[in-house]
Image (cartoon, rainbow, N blue to C red):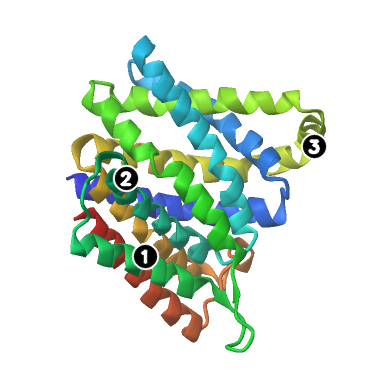
Amino acid sequence: MWLIIALLAPIFYAVSNVFDNILANKSFKNPVTLTFYSSLFNVVFVLFLFLFSDLSFPQISFLPIFILLGIINVLYLFPYYKGLQSDDTSVVVSFFGLGRIFIPIWAFFIIGEQLSALKYIGIALVIIGSVLLSIKGSFKDIKFSKAIFYILLASFIISIEGVLLKYLFEQGVSVNNGVAWEMLISFIYTLFFLLHKKTRLDIVENFTLFKKKTLLFFVEEGATFVAFFSGSYALSIAPVSLVRGIGTLTPFFVLAYAKLLGKKYPYLFNEQIGVGNTLKKIILFSVTALGVFLIAR
């Protein structure tokens, strides 16, 4: 049961990634402004949860965790949007696999947990797959995609999120409350953007564009909400490492959507889908995914 629910996360995250690409590359060049307008829809979905479930104010002892979750939910978006502006969407998303290597490394340095040989192999595969995906140019003029550095930072920021949510669920916090309070606090955090004059002016100047793109935002944020909620629900009933490991399937879905719909709706995708590029991506996505599952064992 949890596997089916967990699979909904990469399926819908892939949809949101495609629309994030449009917003980041063809509409909003400033990641801060894009983050602000995206977060407005958090209120809509929190109200939805309020209407269909019993939300309650979290225990005071849990507030620091929710505040940290809210900040994480906003901060990772800045390098994520910059990453989308630097490479193919599926490649950018695959780099999030790098975040999976932080958990066992933290466990080693913080609590002295010894890594097994499989985990070392898994970490090596994730790094190899990501580095090979990031290589651009000819053999004589090798360059690395800027996206790998942006997403390395984004994945580092968000890598702790699943662990914190799992802890809250184990302490009796409901999935509805966990999701709602993280989203609400992240929205409150973005309101502080308005205190910065330059950012405030950019947000105001782009308001007309935001109104034109409201439907696009709604579809993107709706897919994100479904993915986040289903992933959180899976976390409440299954181990963090397994649920997060399922997330490595996201770039496969992004690539599949591009192959199925790219010719008919080219505007939707920032994706090279030639035979050679597609085969390279599938092989290296698989290497990264295998590495993540070995780490999760």
Q: Which residue is mark 3?
A: 202
Give x and y (percent) for residue 216: 61, 46
Q: Please tell me how crowded label 3 is: few (under 14), some (14-19), or many (20+) other residues with Cα within 10 Å.
A: some
The image's mark for residue 289 is none
| Image quadrant assignment for residue 286 | bottom left
Instruction: Of the two numbered discs 3 and 1 on the same chain, state the one appearing first in sequence.
Output: 1
Q: Which residue is mark 1?
A: 126
Instruction: Of the two numbered discs 3 and 2 on the same chain, state the one appearing first in sequence.
Output: 2
| Image quadrant assignment for residue 144 | bottom right
Identify the image quadrant of the C terminus.
bottom left
Q: Please tell me how crowded label 2 is: few (under 14), some (14-19), or many (20+) other residues with Cα within 10 Å.
A: few
Q: Please tell me how crowded label 1 is: few (under 14), some (14-19), or many (20+) other residues with Cα within 10 Å.
A: many
Tell me how far mark 2 sits from mark 1, CA to CA: 20 Å
Tell me how far mark 3 sits from mark 1, CA to CA: 38 Å
Q: In the image, what residue occupies the spot 24% across and 44% down?
A: 112
Toward the viewer: 122 or 48?
Answer: 122
Identify the image quadrant of the N terminus.
top left
Give x and y (percent) for residue 9: 36, 48
* SS at badge 1: helix
Above or below: residue 157 compared with residue 171: below
Give x and y (percent) for residue 199: 77, 34
* SS at badge 3: helix
Above or below: residue 265 compared with residue 279: above
Q: Say which amino acid is labelled 1.
A: Val
Between disc 3 and disc 2, the foreground one is 2
Q: Which residue is mark 2?
A: 109
| Left or right position of 143 against 291 | right
Q: Say which amino acid is labelled 2.
A: Phe
Give x and y (percent) for residue 120: 27, 63
Q: Say which amino acid is labelled 3.
A: Asp
| Left or right position of 66 against 147 | left
